[in-house]
Image (tube, rainbow, N blue to C red):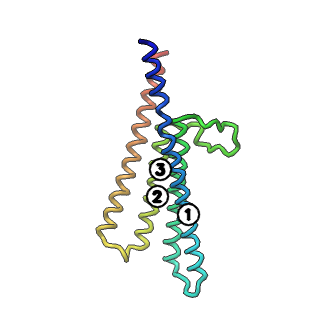
């Protein structure tokens, strides 16, 4: 019976590798974002130096779009590297000079907070684009974008509070066990 339980446990432990193709798919999505970034950058350069240059507001909106793509790419990197490291397998890059600083202390809680911060940043860029282009947008859309942004902020704040409570509980239980 113990052998069957051990095999079941090993199978369950092995099943984490089922996530590996998901992370590979996110890498493909990142390649798509690089293509989108380069296309938008080319569009910006062509319009800025073309026969009919675009105005400052249009340039600002395109640049904010580029920043948005970069922030989403950063979010993808955090999910790919952090998720793989946390849920699938160690990356074994401790001695690599380019190892991201945050990777040395990544766990599910830290990853959720970093992802929340990235989502708030992306939402902020979208909101800034909306405010710059407010004259061309309806009030209903602007209102909902602000509400959604506030929900992201409150969700992130709640995650930080829950993480802090969990860490305090863990510290207290460790102190009590000694």
Q: Earlier in the sequence, mark 1 or mark 2?
A: 1
For discs 1 and 2, the disc positioned in front in the rendered view = 1
Q: Are marks 3 and 2 in contact (CB under 8 Å)?
A: no
Q: Nearer the viewer, residue 25 or 133?
A: 25
Residue hosting label 2: 122
Between the residue at mark 3 and the residue at mark 2, the CA separation in whole angstroms equals 9 Å
Residue hosting label 1: 35
Q: Residue at x 40, y 42 (%)?
A: 159
Between the residue at mark 1 and the residue at mark 2, the CA separation in whole angstroms equals 19 Å
Residue 168: quarter of image? top left
Label 1, residues with CA under 10 Å away: few <14, some 14-19, many ≥20: few
Residue 128, percent across and down?
Answer: 44, 66
Q: Residue at x 31, y 72 (%)?
A: 138
Between the residue at mark 3 and the residue at mark 1, the CA separation in whole angstroms equals 25 Å
Q: Residue at x 53, y 42 (%)?
A: 82
Q: Earlier in the sequence, mark 3 or mark 1?
A: 1
- Residue positioned most to the bottom: 51
Residue 95, percent across and down?
Answer: 70, 37
Label 2, residues with CA under 10 Å away: few <14, some 14-19, many ≥20: many
Label 3, residues with CA under 10 Å away: few <14, some 14-19, many ≥20: some
* Count of numbered marks: 3
Q: Is residue 49 left or right of residue 124?
A: right
Q: Secondary structure at mark 2?
A: helix
For discs 3 and 1, the disc positioned in front in the rendered view = 1
Q: Are marks 1 and 2 in contact (CB under 8 Å)?
A: no
Residue hosting label 3: 117
């Amino acid at each position: 019976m113990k052998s069957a339980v051990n095999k079941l446990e090993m199978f369950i432990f092995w099943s984490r590798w089922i996530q590996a193709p998901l992370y590979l798919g996110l890498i493909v999505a990142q390649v798509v974002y690089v293509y989108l970034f380069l296309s938008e950058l080319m569009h910006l350069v062509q319009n800025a130096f073309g026969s009919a240059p675009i105005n400052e507001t249009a340039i600002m909106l395109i640049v904010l779009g580029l920043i948005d793509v970069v922030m989403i790419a950063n979010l993808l990197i955090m999910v790919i590297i952090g998720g793989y490291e946390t849920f699938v397998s160690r990356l074994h890059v401790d001695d690599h000079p380019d190892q991201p600083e945050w990777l040395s202390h990544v766990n599910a809680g830290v990853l959720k907070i970093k992802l929340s911060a990235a989502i708030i940043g992306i939402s902020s860029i979208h909101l800034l684009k909306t405010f710059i282009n407010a004259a061309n947008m309806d009030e209903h859309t602007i209102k909902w974008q602000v509400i959604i942004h506030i929900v992201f902020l409150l969700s992130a704040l709640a995650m930080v509070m829950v993480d802090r409570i969990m860490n305090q509980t863990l510290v207290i239980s460790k102190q009590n066990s000694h």
